Image (tube, rainbow, N blue to C red):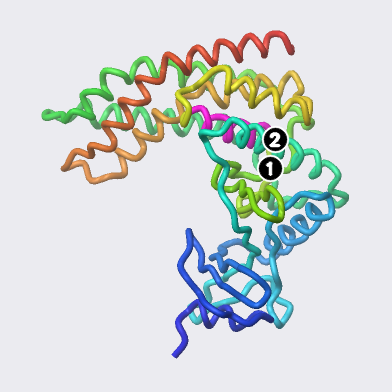
């Protein structure tokens, strides 16, 4: 009897030599090279659009993963439980090193190149990839409600642990910053020129330095939204890994800007994306979803690190705010 990944792989025109478990996928060593079988929960239309977009990016000299069709010409294969899977190409190599400025600068230039390439896409943008232009505002309003809920829950506890005491001491300062960003966003008018195709999850794990070139992978969150969301996501993650080093952050933004010129309002949005205390919310949200009967030392450690880094983060934001003023 076949195991599930073998049943799925059988539906493709390839000879499978071995199958192993990878990150969120099954890795298949085949006669055509390494392939990945990944669960897919979207529509046929979205999968076919994504396959076409990846082919288009290849034509634009962007090194990116490709989606393969089954023997029957289907965009995805199904297992016995009717779960859908996509078969994707795999690049062997090292992920973008968050301690290497050279890697990070290259990755951010690559992102700008990706955005430039997608502007040449000749077909109409499907409705199913378009995100609400106010998505960021709605997200931050939701985050703010969740932060209040965590605050109210902890405030009602008679016996507070170390994490809860620390959270309550820091809540007012971080929440004030969260609300300030949200209020500024409410006054922003969203222009069509700010939106475009986005990778949707651009981070160090999805940039692979391989023999075939520096590849971009994991496009399953590909969308049409405010384009600097990709840039802000990458910069924020790199800054968190590097103690919000101001010179690094400005170098990354400058590297992107040198390949794809940022519009004045894009600089404003970039500031809002980075000014929201995302990590503080993330830790609070993780706490709210965890088992609260025991104290997670990891949560306390992460919160302590966020507090320690806040001065450096504020310094970076002040520098970025000056850049925004110069561009407007």
Earlier residue among tags 2 and 1: 1
Residue 327 percent across, percent down from the top left: 74, 13
Residue 54: x and y, percent?
74, 56
Label disc, if present, on residue 198 of the rendered structure = 1
Question: Image check: 169 left or right of 182?
Answer: left
Q: Are marks 2 and 1 in contact (CB under 8 Å)?
A: yes
Residue at point 58% right, 11% down? 319
- Farthest residue to the right: give it: 122
Image height of 116 relative to 3, above or below: above
Instruction: Decide: is 202 above or below 21.
Output: above
On screen, residue 132 versus residue 183, left or right, reads right
The mark found on residue 227 in the picture is 2
**Residue 207 against residue 237 in the figure, above or below:** below
Q: Residue at x 77, y 60 (%)?
A: 52
Depth check: give the residue in front, 95 or 205: 95
Residue at the extreme bottom = 1
- Assign the N terminus to one quadrant of the image: bottom left
Q: Is residue 237 magenta?
A: yes
Residue 104 in percent (x, y) is at: 61, 34
- Tell me the residue at 56%/68% (across/down): 37
Residue 97 visible, this angle: yes
Q: Which residues are magenta?
A: 227-239
Percent coordinates x, y for residue 3 in the rendering: 45, 82
């Amino acid at each position: 009897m076949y195991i599930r990944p073998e049943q799925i792989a059988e539906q493709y025109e390839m000879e499978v030599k071995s199958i192993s478990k990878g990150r969120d996928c099954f890795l298949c060593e085949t006669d055509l090279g390494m392939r990945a079988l990944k669960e897919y929960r979207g529509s046929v239309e979205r999968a076919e659009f994504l396959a076409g977009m990846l082919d288009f990016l290849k034509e634009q000299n962007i090194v990116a993963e490709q989606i393969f069709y089954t023997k029957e010409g289907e965009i995805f294969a199904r297992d016995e439980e009717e779960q859908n899977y996509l078969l994707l190409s795999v690049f062997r190599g090292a992920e973008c090193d968050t301690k290497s400025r050279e890697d990070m600068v290259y990755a951010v230039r690559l992102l700008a190149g990706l955005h430039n390439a997608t502007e040449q896409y000749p077909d109409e943008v499907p409705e199913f990839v378009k995100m609400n232009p106010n998505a960021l505002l709605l997200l931050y309003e939701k985050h703010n409600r969740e932060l209040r809920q965590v605050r109210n829950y902890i405030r009602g506890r008679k016996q507070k642990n170390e994490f809860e005491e620390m959270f309550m001491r820091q809540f007012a300062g971080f929440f004030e910053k969260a609300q300030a960003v949200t209020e500024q966003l409410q006054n922003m008018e969203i222009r069509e020129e700010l939106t475009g195709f986005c990778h949707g999850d651009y981070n160090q794990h999805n940039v692979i330095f391989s023999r075939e070139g520096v590849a971009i992978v994991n496009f399953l969150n590909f969308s049409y939204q405010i384009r600097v969301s990709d840039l802000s996501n990458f910069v924020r993650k790199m800054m968190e890994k590097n103690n919000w080093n101001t010179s690094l952050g400005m170098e990354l933004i400058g590297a992107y800007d040198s390949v794809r010129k940022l519009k004045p309002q894009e600089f404003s949005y970039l500031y809002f994306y980075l000014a929201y205390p995302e990590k503080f919310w993330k830790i609070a949200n993780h706490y709210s979803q965890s088992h609260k009967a025991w104290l997670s030392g990891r949560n306390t450690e992460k919160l302590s690190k966020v507090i320690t880094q806040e001065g450096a983060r504020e310094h970076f934001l002040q520098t970025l705010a000056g850049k925004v003023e110069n561009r407007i």
